[in-house]
Amino acid sequence: MHRTKVRIVEDALDANNTIARANRDDFDRNGVTVVNFMSAPGAGKTTLLERTIADLGDVRAGVLEGDVEGSMDADRLSALHVPVTQLNTASGFGGECHLDANMVRSAIPELPLADIDLLVIENVGNLVCPAEFRVGEDIRVMVTAVTEGEDKPLKYPLMFRACDLVLINKIDLLPHLDVSVERIEANVEAVHPGVPTMRVSARTGEGIDEWRDWLVRTAAREPAGAPA
């Protein structure tokens, strides 16, 4: 029985990866670079995008907004006059706590791929499931907030191992917390040696220029594995 369960999981992931490759083909055909943006709920993904997505120079950006229900985050980003497509997992997908390749494929007809260079897929806030499902992205970015404490990389290592960049957000709150950002970075390094990290504050703007430059280089398909 145990082997049967494992086989079912393997089959589901294989099917997901097949659809993810089809998504990637569609994105590549249109010259669109795709970033899978992941975090726990409340880490600040949407606020970071508000700070960056409308000010990328010549890069034309769009967002695929993933949530279980509602459109609050999509409404906020739409105010920036960038194309935003809402994808709710409660609508026909069982209310899943992540986006998978099939969900993203269902949204592709609604995406203005011919009119954008960069698509940011803001995944459902969760520290486990999103890491397991490729959706056709080029790059994965993980946001962790200092308010989550120092131990999240050690408790949820797959999320940190699956990403190409870790943003450590809400650093403006460090004076009010018994948290060491150096310890967070050390724990990230322990589970994913060599992954680049950036310290940012979506509220004050600290570190945002570096993050924005990274996005621009990523959209240009330049090597984006390390901060400038």
Image: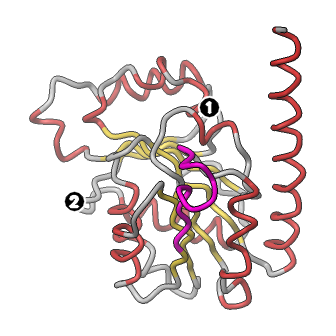
- Mark 1 crowd level (few <14, some 14–19, many ≥20, 10 Å Cα): few
Q: Earlier in the sequence, mark 2 or mark 1?
A: 1
When the figure is inspected, residue 144 is found, relative to residue 190, above or below; the finding is: below
146 sits to left or right of 226: left
- In three-dimensional space, the C-alpha distance between marks 2 and 1, rounded to whole angstroms, equals 27 Å
Q: Which residue is mark 2?
A: 203
The residue that appears at 26% across and 46% down in the rendered structure is 170
Magenta residue span:
86-97
- The quadrant in which the N terminus is found is top right
- Mark 2 crowd level (few <14, some 14–19, many ≥20, 10 Å Cα): some
Q: Which residue is mark 1?
A: 194
Question: Which numbered disc covers residue 110?
Answer: none
Q: Observer-nearest residue: 157 or 94? A: 94
Query: In the image, what residue type sits under mark 1?
Result: Gly
Q: Main secondary structure of the magenta part?
A: loop
The residue that appears at 54% across and 18% down in the rendered structure is 190
83 sits to left or right of 36: left
When the figure is inspected, residue 35 is found, relative to residue 189, above or below; the finding is: below
Q: Residue furthest left?
A: 176
When the figure is inspected, residue 79 is found, relative to residue 64, above or below; the finding is: below
Magenta stretch containing residue 164, yes or no? Answer: no
